[in-house]
Image (tube, grey):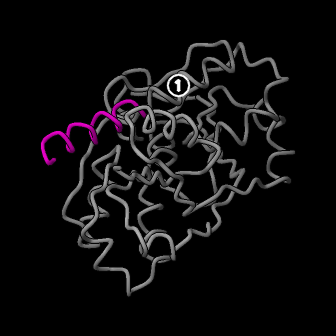
């Protein structure tokens, strides 16, 4: 049976694993990284959100971590934004509001290309994210005239994959959904597994993730749109062409 590992935080993995199993594959979670909320930052978030015109969530983890403390606020006068159609749908379902997001692309560059953001003069943005991350969005919005604040509401911590099981039966494919996960995979696996990792098939939702894998020597990479159905369809097409 085809065995596929999904490397994303467990809280966001259930839907993807279900779709993979519906194809008849053995699908398992690969716990490379988990999300640890930061209580002090979350406690301060509602007051900061009240002062903003636009609330931007950088990732599904940001939505999952921050929404519970914001759900009781009246956000009807504020613009909600994110990247990625799946994140936008989730945020719209939670908030009952329209969510600004790029129809083409699923990154900060695509968001910044929207005509609504060409002139950000006087706008007050609150970017909700984990510790670290890219500065492109904040820097570009500030250069366009916005006042930008960043709320770092979680940190990423190492997971604990079962490397003995991995060594005994390497997977047929790994779905990996962020560049940070690529770094985690090769760091946690250690040098002795480098050859195995380089030979695996990877399915990723963004060219930037594929570039990171390529830098580590991976040669079989499927790049799809950034939603679970597209990831599964990309793998299905690969296996159809390479029985």
Quadrant assignment, res 113: top left
Quadrant assignment, res 99: top right
Q: Residue at x 32, y 45 (%)?
A: 206
Q: Which residues are magenta?
A: 228-243
Residue that carries the numbered disc 1 in the rendered image: 88
Q: Residue at x 54, y 21 (%)?
A: 89
Residue nearest the observer in this picture, 207 or 50: 207
Q: Residue furthest bottom?
A: 192
- The dominant secondary structure in magenta is helix
Q: Relative to residue 176, is residue 150 drawn left or right?
A: right
Q: Position of residue 241 (x, y in %)?
A: 12, 42
Q: Residue at x 70, y 14 (%)?
A: 77
Q: Relative to residue 241, is residue 194 drawn left or right?
A: right
Q: Position of residue 19 (x, y in %)?
A: 45, 33
The image shows a total of numbered marks equal to 1
Give SS at disc 1: helix
Residue nearest the observer in this picture, 168 or 234: 168
Q: Relative to residue 35, is residue 230 drawn left or right?
A: left
Q: Magenta segment: does it hold 148?
A: no
Q: Position of residue 173 (x, y in %)?
A: 33, 55
Q: Residue furthest front?
A: 1
Q: Residue at x 50, y 41 (%)?
A: 17
Residue nearest the observer in this picture, 37 or 151: 37
Q: Position of residue 131 (x, y in %)?
A: 63, 59
Quadrant assignment, res 217: bottom left
Q: Magenta segment: does it hold 231?
A: yes
Residue 160 versus residue 5 in the image, above or below: below
Q: Please rate how many residues cluster around mark 1, counting C-alpha atoms within 10 Å: few if below 14, some from 14 to 19, many from 20.
A: many
Residue 66 versus residue 129 in the image, above or below: above
Residue nearest the observer in this picture, 72 or 26: 26
């Amino acid at each position: 049976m085809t065995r596929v590992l999904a490397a994303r935080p467990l809280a966001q993995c259930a839907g993807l694993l279900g779709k993979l199993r519906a194809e008849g594959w053995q699908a398992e979670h690969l716990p490379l990284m988990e999300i640890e909320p930061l209580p002090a930052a979350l406690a301060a978030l509602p007051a900061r959100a009240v002062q903003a015109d636009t609330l931007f969530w950088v990732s599904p983890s940001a939505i999952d971590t921050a929404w519970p403390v914001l759900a009781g606020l009246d956000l009807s006068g504020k613009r909600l934004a994110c990247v990625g159609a799946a994140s936008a749908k989730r945020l719209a379902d939670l908030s009952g509001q329209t969510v600004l997001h790029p129809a083409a692309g699923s990154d900060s560059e695509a968001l910044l290309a929207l005509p609504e953001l060409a002139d950000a003069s006087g706008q007050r943005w609150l970017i909700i994210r984990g510790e670290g991350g890219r500065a492109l969005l904040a820097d570009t919005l500030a250069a366009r005239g916005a006042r930008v604040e960043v709320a770092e509401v979680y940190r990423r911590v190492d997971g604990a994959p079962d490397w003995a099981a991995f060594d005994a039966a390497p997977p047929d494919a790994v779905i990996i959904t962020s560049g940070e996960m690529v770094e985690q995979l090769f760091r946690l696996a250690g040098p002795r597994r480098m050859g195995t990792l380089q030979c695996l098939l990877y399915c990723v939702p963004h060219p930037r993730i594929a570039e990171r894998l390529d830098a580590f020597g991976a040669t079989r990479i499927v790049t799809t749109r950034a939603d679970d159905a597209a990831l599964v369809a990309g793998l299905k097409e690969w296996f159809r062409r390479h029985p």
